[in-house]
């Protein structure tokens, strides 16, 4: 497992929890894609930041993402991350979206730094 990417994901989760969205954008490529919900994707850091602000509001500013089991497949400057993603939100009693997910993330190494190019916390459930 790529320990650097695992550390980056943990740091990004912390930035989400603390609502440090400017800091969060440092983890993404310029052309990154975020799956906001099934059927809705946003592209680019500006749109991703805006989406995370809306996601935080949806969860009444109490979202806490963490990762469980992880598997990484690395090929050169690209890594596919399969992760059990767990969401908690103590100020939101219910959600129409699953709080335990099997996420897929794609990281690319750009100028010596691993950055997230695709952030899909819904993983293969998009096929459902």
Image (tube, helix red, strand yellow):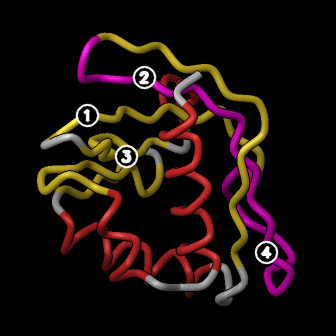
The residue beneath circle 1 is 108
Q: Number of labelled discs?
A: 4
The region drawn magenta spans 76-99
The residue beneath circle 4 is 89
> Cα distance, mark 2 to mark 3?
21 Å
Which marked residue is nearer to the observer: mark 2 or mark 1?
Answer: 1
Q: At numbered mark 1, what does the secondary structure look like: helix, strand or loop?
A: strand
- Looking at the image, residue 2 lies above or below residue 23: above
Q: At numbered mark 4, what does the secondary structure look like: helix, strand or loop?
A: strand
Q: Residue at x 13, y 43 (%)?
A: 111
> Cα distance, mark 2 to mark 4?
27 Å
Name the disc covering residue 17, or none: none
- Looking at the image, residue 62 lies above or below residue 24: below
The image position of residue 41, as x and y in percent, is 30, 52
Question: Mark 2 Cα within 10 Å, few/some/many (few <14, many 20+)?
Answer: some
Location of residue 63 (image quadrant): bottom right
Question: Mark 1 Cα within 10 Å, few/some/many (few <14, many 20+)?
Answer: many
Which marked residue is nearer to the observer: mark 2 or mark 3?
Answer: 2
Which marked residue is nearer to the observer: mark 2 or mark 4?
Answer: 2
Q: Was residue 6 drawn as part of the magenta stretch in this picture?
A: no
The residue beneath circle 2 is 80
The residue beneath circle 3 is 39
Asked if the residue under mark 4 is in contact with the one under mark 1, i.e. CB atoms within 8 Å, the reply is no
First in sequence, mark 2 or 1: give its number: 2
The image position of residue 7, as x and y in percent, is 57, 49
Which marked residue is nearer to the observer: mark 1 or mark 3?
Answer: 1
Location of residue 54 (image quadrant): bottom left
Which marked residue is nearer to the observer: mark 4 or mark 3?
Answer: 4
């Amino acid at each position: 497992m790529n320990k650097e990417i695992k550390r980056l994901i943990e740091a990004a989760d912390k930035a989400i929890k603390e609502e440090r969205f400017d800091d969060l954008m440092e983890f993404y490529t310029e052309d990154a894609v975020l799956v906001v919900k099934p059927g809705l994707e946003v592209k680019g850091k500006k749109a991703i930041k805006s989406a995370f602000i809306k996601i935080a509001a949806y969860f009444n500013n109490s979202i806490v993402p963490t990762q469980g089991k992880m598997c990484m497949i690395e090929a050169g400057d690209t890594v596919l991350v399969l992760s059990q993603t767990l969401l908690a939100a103590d100020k939101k009693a219910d959600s129409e979206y699953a709080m335990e997910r099997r996420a897929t993330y794609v990281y690319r190494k750009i100028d010596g730094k691993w950055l997230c190019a695709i952030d899909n916390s819904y993983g293969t459930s998009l096929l459902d």
